[in-house]
Image: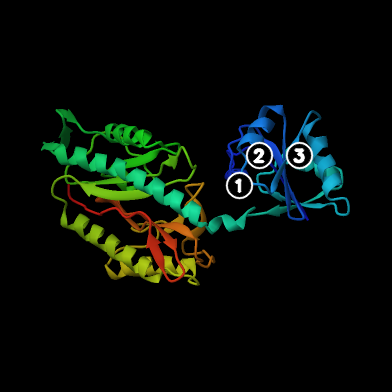
Amino acid sequence: MIKLSYASTKNKDMKYAVKIDILDDFFFLEAEGEKYIFLDHREFGFFQEKNKNPNIEAVLVTGGGRNDFALALIQKYSPNSNEIAVPVYFPLDLADHLRKKGIVLKIRKPYYPWRAIKGGEEIEMIEKSLKKTHSAFLKIEEILGASEIVDNLIFFEGKALTSEFLKSEAERVLFDEEMLCTEGMIISCGKGAAIPHHPGQGNLFAGETIVCDIFPVSKQSGYFADMTRTYVKGEPSKKIRNMYDSILRAQEAAFALIKPGILAKEVHKAVSASLIRDGFNVGDIGFTHGTGHGLGLEVHEAPHINKVSEEILQPGNVFTIEPGLYYPNIGGVRIEDVVCVTDSGYKDLTNFPKKLII
């Protein structure tokens, strides 16, 4: 059965398939081990110049409507079958047109399941992205370290320190590293930090948790980093210290399980059990989300490390381990590192220190 997709490389399956940025939508067809990309004059020459994959044949498209062209492709490359495999993001109007012509569309999700298993070059690119992301955390730690506490507010260079300022400084140093914050970032404090994906806004306060979750993408490779650290400027309460120490233990419980053949949900169960042993909640309060997610060309991809995941860990899986605790009257604590499953265990790709008090 042939596979047919239609998208630009803004879609990460297409980026994965062709490895070259192509701005406009194009047809990509796979048939009997052969791969074909169909481009018009705007992209054809550029692709021919940059393509390093000899298994992809570029075909110049000189005209015709999209829907009829798709039907012609199917008739040419699948003359003995009216069934084709398509991704979930296949255009609906095109799907309707083909169905009216008697074509049976078989949805494939995921379209490229092997994206979850990274090769050595991919792992190196992710690790490089993470190393460049260290610069943002070093800048945050530098600013917090140089700040002063005045009436429970944090002041830096005579001005009240805000989430917005820290984000702008982090984004600036990341830009210098050719890392782009296309998905935003999280620097939240106090009650905001008790909401896992609250982006953060306004003043930062002494003695309260500041959750910094930064997930930029490499301008060069297209591979994401994803890191979280939680800081307190000044003296944290005993409850915050207990939350932080419990998150560290929960992360270690996850690390101890990671190896090939383990169900992803067992890693999540280990994190939950560790937090429950420490007297914290799991569910609608406390630890309210999954333990982690795959990382690569997308900031969230397979495998999924949560309570319902049936995925089995394999060498080459790259994913986050990010337990968190969230209480509106206290704040939030989350720590996130990226690991890669190896033949015998795992490798920490983040390799950045963890410290609560600045």
Q: Residue at x 29, y 46 (%)?
A: 211
Q: Nearer the viewer, residue 27 or 249?
A: 27
- Please, what is the three-letter code of the amino acid marked with disc 2? Ala
In this view, the mark in front (3 or 2): 2
Which x, y percent locates residue 46? Answer: 63, 32
Q: Look at the image and tell me in which quarter the N terminus lies.
A: bottom right
In this view, the mark in front (3 or 1): 1
Q: Nearer the viewer, residue 283 or 110?
A: 110
* Secondary structure state at the residue bearing disc 2: strand
Q: Residue furthest right?
A: 80
Labelled pair 2, 1 in contact (Cβ < 8 Å): yes
Is tag 2's residue or tag 1's residue first in the polypeptide sequence? 2
Which x, y percent locates residue 35? Answer: 72, 48
Is tag 3's residue or tag 2's residue first in the polypeptide sequence? 2
Q: Which residue is mark 3?
A: 94
Q: Which residue is mark 1?
A: 13
Q: How many C-alpha atoms fall within 10 Å of the one at disc 2: few (<14), some, or many (≥20)?
A: many
For the residues marked 3 and 2, what is the alpha-carbon distance in whole angstroms? Answer: 12 Å
Residue 239 visible in rendering:
yes
